[in-house]
Image (cartoon, rainbow, N blue to C red):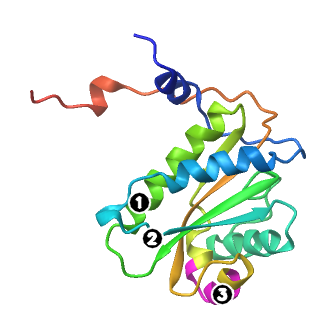
């Protein structure tokens, strides 16, 4: 059976090389709408979206902080692989389902980007840096509202790599009891 949504899911992979060309405002609006349309626990709609240009200097500071916390040397690429746009998803502090809700929203957005022919990368590796000693500083710089905390991010742009979707082993990963 062929289905447009299933084809996009099968085709999507994490892009790790981007051109400098930014997605259009229309493309970003479509991606953000996909995130806004995601279901949330108790219809709380607690996810907030902060769109940041890939050339924003705060991202270099965030990359340095991430590497420092992990004891890593400078990498040949930054944590978002030079994508021209990043979308940081934050959620209301203390709501039990925020991590799940943010994950659903970012997946909607990743699939929307893929359907538009845009590369994307779901990013969690900066979580510790955005929850550490510099949380308030980074939150302010990234326009994360007060009372909200970073959950996950999405890098978006025109991909230059041709990374294939990951392989899986359904026999090992799925247990059927029906």
State the extent of the magenta-drawn residues as a range. Answer: 131-138
Picture layout, residue 65 above or below residue 86: below
Relative height, residue 172 to residue 37 (above, below): above
**x 77%, y 55%: residue:** 85
Q: Which mark is residue 101?
A: 1
Is mark 2 in CB contact (under 8 Å) with mark 3?
Answer: no
- Quarter containing the N terminus: top left
Q: Quadrant of residue 56?
A: bottom right
23 w.r.t. 59: above or below: above
Please report contact status of discs 3 and 1: CB closer than 8 Å, yes or no: no
Dot 3: element: loop
For residue 93, which quarter of the picture? bottom left
Crowdedness of circle 1 by 10 Å Cα count: few (<14), some, many (20+)? many
Which mark identifies residue 46? 2
Q: Residue furthest left?
A: 178
Marks 2 and 1: CB-CB under 8 Å? Answer: yes
Disc 2 and disc 1: Cα gap in Å?
A: 8 Å
Q: Which mark is in front, 2 or 3?
A: 2
- Which is more toward the observer, 165 or 7? 7
Q: What percent of the width, then of the height, locates residue 171?
A: 28, 23
């Amino acid at each position: 059976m062929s289905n447009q949504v299933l084809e996009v899911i099968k085709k999507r992979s994490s892009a790790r090389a981007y051109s400098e060309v930014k997605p259009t405002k229309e493309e970003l609006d479509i991606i953000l709408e996909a995130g806004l349309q995601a279901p949330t626990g108790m219809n709380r709609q607690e996810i907030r979206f902060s769109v940041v240009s890939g050339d924003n200097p705060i991202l270099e500071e965030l990359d340095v902080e991430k590497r420092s916390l992990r004891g890593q040397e400078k990498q040949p690429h930054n944590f978002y692989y030079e994508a021209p746009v990043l979308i940081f998803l934050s959620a209301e502090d203390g709501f039990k389902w925020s991590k799940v809700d943010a994950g659903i929203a970012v997946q909607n957005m990743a699939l929307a980007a893929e359907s538009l022919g845009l590369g994307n990368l779901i990013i969690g590796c900066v979580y510790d840096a955005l929850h550490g000693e510099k949380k308030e500083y980074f939150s302010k710089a990234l326009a994360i509202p007060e009372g909200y905390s970073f959950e996950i991010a999405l890098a978006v742009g025109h991909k230059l790599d041709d990374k294939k979707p990951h392989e899986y082993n359904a026999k090992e990963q799925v247990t059927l009891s029906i």
